[in-house]
Amino acid sequence: MNACGLSPSGARHRVRTSRVFRVRRAAYTLSPHHDALTDLWAVILTIDPGRGCLSHWTAAWMHRMWRATGSPIHMSVVGSGGRRLPGVVVHAPRILLPDDVVEVRGLPVTSAGRTVLDVAARAGDDTVRRLIREGEVQGLLPAGEMLRVVAAHPNHPGAGRVRRVDPGTPADALGQTTLEDELDALIRELPMPAPERQLTVRGASGAWYHLDFGWGTARLAAEADGRSVHERASALESDRFRDNDLAAVGWLTMRFTDRQLRRGRADAGRQLVAAMADRGTSA
């Protein structure tokens, strides 16, 4: 409000007369209604609009690498903690490189790679690995990106953990893992026997294949297909050969995409249970 030429008393008067509305201390909006993004903008403007950016778990939510915003809000201001606000954790990194900050939905946010690095300083291996997987799935972390980020910040407290969870793993090895987790969670809820993970089976041609989930007695396979439409199209011929090669020795392969598992979850579950029953096997 001071930047607009209003004194504190002038600001209070406008709040009392409903001409402006308080979002957070020293941050106001012209609308009585505001969402989570408005609240985050208010935090940035209040603490340090010139140097501040959202970071850590808040940045992970902004990138849609983590589903819950959680509390408190996390923000980074280079070299200084800046003003303190209730419900806000202000980090003071020694340096943020130009590539470390991007714009997401109009807000300054640490990049996906820098976000993983920051979270890694405080989270466990499994959490960091899941963030990397999700970043790969969404195309936010191209192959080699975490290696680049760690090389740029070798002394960051999260660098060791990122190295430990193999940041150099190529994208094609990580791209489907998060979706496999979704399929695994679905299967656990179904009245079906537990499958074998990464089961190796031999097709009619003599070629060996790795199955995401397999039930050997039923000769049933479930595959999490996390590839893009373009990638699926380019792999169509090899997929058909694999499925036919396995079908020739009695295997039924059921493939599930991201949309099927996250939006058509119930249908996917019914299909799996029906296929298992048809093959004479149940829980």
Image: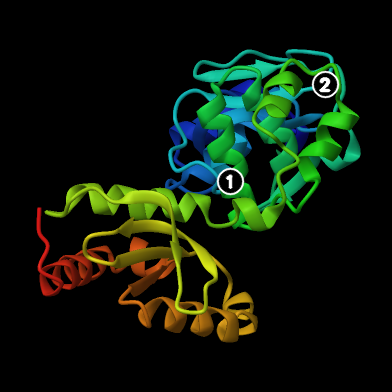
Q: Residue at x 76, y 41 (%)?
A: 168
Q: Residue at x 39, y 49 (%)?
A: 197
Q: Are marks 2 and 1 in contact (CB under 8 Å)?
A: no
The picture places residue 96, in percent across and down from the top left corner, at: 85, 29
Which residue corresponds to mark 2?
78
* Image quarter of residue 51: top right
Amino acid, disc 2: Val
Q: Quadrant of the N terminus?
A: top right
Labels 2, 1: front one? 1
Q: Secondary structure at mark 1?
A: helix
- Asked if residue 245 is positioned above or below residue 73 in the image, the reply reads below
Question: Which circle's residue, 2 or 1, is located before the other in the chain?
Answer: 2
The residue nearer to you, when weighing 114 against 174, is 174
User: How packed is label 1: few (under 14 Cα within 10 Å), some, or many (20 or more)?
Assistant: many
Residue 239, how many percent across, how many down?
A: 53, 79
Relative to 146, residue 263 above or below: below
Q: Is residue 244 left or right of residue 190?
A: right
Q: Residue at x 43, y 46 (%)?
A: 32
Left or right: residue 168 versus residue 232 is: right
Q: Nearer the viewer, residue 212 or 201?
A: 201
**For residue 89, which numbered disc appears in the image?**
none
The image shows residue 120 at horizontal and vertical percentages of 64, 24
Per the image, the residue denoted by label 1 is 133
Disc 2 on helix, strand or loop? loop
Amino acid type, residue under disc 1 in the picture: Arg
From the top left corner, tell me how far across and down residue 30 is, in percent.
54, 47
Where 153 falls versus 36 (above or below)? Answer: above
Any part of residue 1 in sight = no
Given residues 34 and 271, the one toward you in this image is 271
Out of 268 and 89, give the one closest to the viewer. 268
